[in-house]
């Protein structure tokens, strides 16, 4: 049993079952035993990999899209360039390298990273050596200034609550403990105001998820963008509306039961983009599009050809595989979706359509 399983079982025995959101928060961010607090989970030696870790092209294209958006917002002389959940810092490093060619952009940027894990902050510090970076625990600390922000696979790591539709309301999935083991159970049915809008498109037995921390984050970002200008680009797996049990645990590139190794497996759930869009008062929301489509619109293929020209052998093979992995419909190309939120006075960032 992991140390965290022991702590959770004692807690549940003392005070009763916990929600999936409580469980995810402890598993991912417990200061001593949390998944992100204790390790670097990325890459082939880790548990999973992400788009920015697959190829530098991802960060380059997103960086240039945000730089174009900065110009479309009148190229403010001081602005916040932010990333939520930056992992190893690779995406921000690639964005900054690519945007060196955009006159004035980096000089005007005030770089902020919102990161909960101290272990990952160390890696980000290394990846961004030479840049002046401010780390924040929460988006609430972002300056009141024009804001250009990106988040890749950040929202999927935020805790969810999960409900099963019943004739008389919703039963919440809870985690209990018996005989020194964690187990899933369901609460008694109750009405849930946050799910009233789902009564029309669900039937008894259907499962839906909500992410309580999602909307408050968007409200903070949207307040700054609506008042001062800016844009946000989000990429994650998920869809416009959540339906079904999407809680997933991954350890060593294999999926496993989310209760098997608390604190030692990554836990995620699909992102319900509609819930994020609804919280973005005062902003324009683009269409939700597959990642592969956005990357093609941003010119990933010509960029891949330029990079390929200086590669040979294994390096060339892995570059071609990375391009395919990011864009192909059988790989990350359609599973991952992208959306942009932007100030109504400016066009959407390149790659996105209203
Ligand atoms: N964007 C990176 C990493 C994705 S993993 C990439 O694509 O490679 C999720 C990231 O979000 C990690 O950096 C994790 O530590 C961070 N994170 C998770 N929950 C968070 C929270 N509540 N507040 C801030 N950062 C969080």
Image: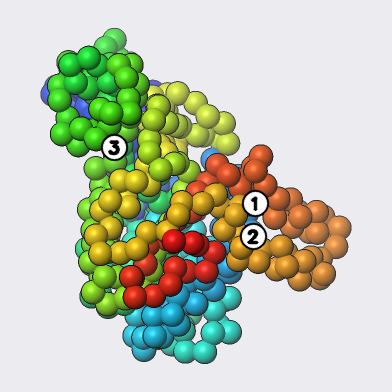
Q: Quadrant of residue 335?
A: top right
Query: In the current view of this chain or complex, which residue is farthest to the top?
Result: 179
What residue is disc 1 on? 327
Which mark sits nearer the N-terminus, 2 or 3? 3
- Residue 297: x %, y % from top left: 61, 63
CA gap, disc 1 to disc 3?
Answer: 28 Å
Instruction: Determine the CA span between mark 1 and mark 2.
Output: 8 Å
Within-10-Å neighbours for mark 2: few <14, some 14–19, many 20+: some
Q: Quick one: label 1 or label 3, which is nearer the N terminus? A: 3
| Percent position of residue 299, x then y | 65, 66
> Does 81 appear above or below 121?
below
Q: Are marks 1 and 2 in contact (CB under 8 Å)?
A: yes
Dots 2, 3 in contact, CB < 8 A: no
Q: CA distance from mark 2 to mark 3?
A: 31 Å
* For residue 88, side relative to residue 342 (left or right): right
Q: Nearer the viewer, residue 219 or 312?
A: 219
Left of 269 or right of it: where is 64?
A: right
Q: Is residue 75 left or right of residue 290?
A: left
Q: Nearer the viewer, mark 2 or mark 3?
A: 2
User: Which residue carries the number 2 mark?
Assistant: 296
Query: Where's residue 150, x and y in %?
Result: 42, 63
Q: How is the image coloured?
A: rainbow
Return the residue at label 3.
Answer: 210
Q: Secondary structure at mark 1?
A: helix
């Amino acid at each position: 049993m992991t140390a965290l399983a022991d702590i959770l079982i004692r807690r549940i025995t003392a005070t009763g079952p916990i929600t999936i959101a409580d469980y995810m928060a402890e598993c991912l961010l417990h200061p001593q035993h949390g998944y992100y607090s204790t390790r670097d989970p990325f890459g082939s030696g880790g548990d999973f990999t992400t788009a920015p870790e697959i190829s530098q092209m991802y960060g380059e294209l997103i960086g240039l899209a945000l730089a174009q958006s900065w110009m479309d917002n009148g190229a403010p002389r001081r602005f916040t360039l932010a990333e939520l959940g930056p992992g190893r810092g690779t995406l921000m490093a690639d964005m900054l390298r690519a945007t060196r060619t955009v006159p004035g952009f980096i000089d005007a940027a005030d770089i902020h990273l919102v990161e909960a894990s101290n272990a990952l902050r160390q890696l980000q510090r290394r990846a961004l050596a030479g840049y002046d970076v401010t780390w924040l625990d929460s988006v609430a600390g972002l300056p009141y200034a024009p804001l250009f922000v990106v988040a890749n696979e950040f929202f999927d790591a935020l805790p969810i609550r999960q409900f099963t539709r019943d004739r008389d309301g919703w039963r919440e999935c809870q985690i209990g403990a018996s005989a020194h083991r964690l187990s899933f159970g369901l609460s008694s049915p109750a009405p849930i105001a946050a799910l009233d809008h789902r009564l029309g498109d669900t039937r008894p037995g259907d499962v839906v998820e909500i992410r309580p921390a999602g909307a408050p984050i968007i409200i903070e970002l949207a307040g700054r963008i609506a008042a001062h200008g800016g844009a946000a680009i989000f990429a994650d797996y998920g869809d416009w509306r959540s339906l079904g049990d999407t809680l997933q645990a991954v350890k060593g590139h294999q999926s496993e039961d989310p209760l098997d190794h608390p604190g030692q497996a990554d836990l995620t759930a699909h992102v319900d983009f509609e819930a994020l869009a609804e919280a973005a008062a005062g902003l324009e929301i683009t269409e939700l599009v597959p990642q592969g489509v956005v990357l093609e619109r941003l010119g990933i293929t010509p960029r891949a050809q330029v990079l390929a020209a200086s590669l040979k052998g294994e390096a060339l093979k892995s570059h071609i595989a990375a391009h395919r992995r990011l864009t192909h419909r059988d790989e990350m190309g359609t599973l991952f979706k992208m959306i942009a939120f932007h100030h109504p006075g400016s066009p959407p960032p390149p790659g996105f359509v209203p």
